[in-house]
Structure formats: C-alpha cells, structure tokens
Image: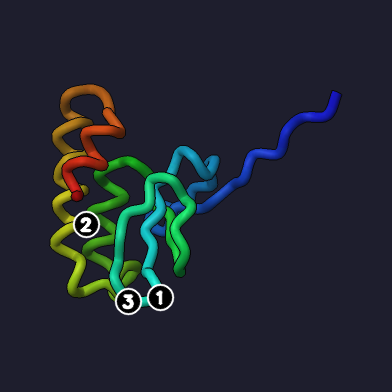
Amino acid sequence: MRRKHTPQRTCIACRQVQGKRQLVRIVRTPEGAVQLDETGKRSGRGAYLCRRAACWEKALRGKQLEHAPDDLARLEQYAATLVEEEAAGGIDESTSEAAVK
C-alpha cells in the first residue's frame, strides 16, 4: 500500500524542515496585511515558523519579517503566548489563535 504524502515546509528562523501542520504560517494578504494562518489555506504570500518561542524571537529580531512593520505588534503578542505556554509545558492551539484575534 502506498504511503500518503506529507507536505514539508522550512521554518524561516531555524531552517528546520518539518511537516506543514507542525508549523505556523504567516501570510501577507493581497491587501498588504500580515496575518497568522493556522489553517494554511489563506491566500497570499506565506512564510512558516516553528511553534517555539526562540524561532519567533529570531524572526521578529531579524529581517525575516521585515515586510510586516505595521503588524509586528500582533505577531509579537502571539510570540508572547508561546513563551508562556512553553513554560507551562504545552501548546494549546485554540488559546494561541484566540490570543491573536
């Protein structure tokens, strides 16, 4: 029996290749807004980040997300929830997505 193909993506911060569902997609919409895309289905130019706080900090400090200056506050807010959840020992995707909205 043939195995089902799992899409692979690369984290823009640590360059580690993982399954698409294990990463968080950040998308720049055609209107120019930058949004988190937990589903991976929004239209627009996308980039992927691990769910680790270190990767988010690196991406926000570096030039990986420089095209999103107006929306950096929202992305930093999401990164802060990752730090809290990482310290608690787990990531609750419903909580982290709600924190951004």
Disc 2 or disc 1, which is closer to the eye? 1
Tell me: 76 left or right of 28.
left
> Viewer-proximal residue, 25 or 94?
94
Disc 1 versus disc 3: distance between alpha carbons? 5 Å
Mark 2 and mark 3 lie on one chain; the one further toward the N terminus is 3
* Residue 59 percent across, percent down from the top left: 30, 60
Residue ID for mark 2:
75
User: Mark 2 belongs to which amino acid?
Assistant: Leu
Disc 2 or disc 3, which is closer to the eye? 3
Tell me: 82 left or right of 52.
left
Q: Secondary structure at mark 3?
A: loop
Residue 26 found in image quarter: bottom left
> Viewer-proximal residue, 48 or 42?
42
Residue 12 found in image quarter: bottom left
Residue ID for mark 3:
32
Residue ID for mark 1:
30
User: Mark 3 belongs to which amino acid?
Assistant: Gly
Q: Secondary structure at mark 1?
A: loop
The residue lying at 52 percent from left, 44 percent from top is: 20
Q: Which mark is residue 76?
A: none
Q: How many marks?
A: 3
User: Mark 1 belongs to which amino acid?
Assistant: Pro
Which part of the image, by quadrant, shows the N terminus?
Answer: top right
Badge 3: few (under 14), some or many (20 or more) residues near its Cα, within 10 Å? some
Labels 1 & 3 near each other (Cβ < 8 A): yes
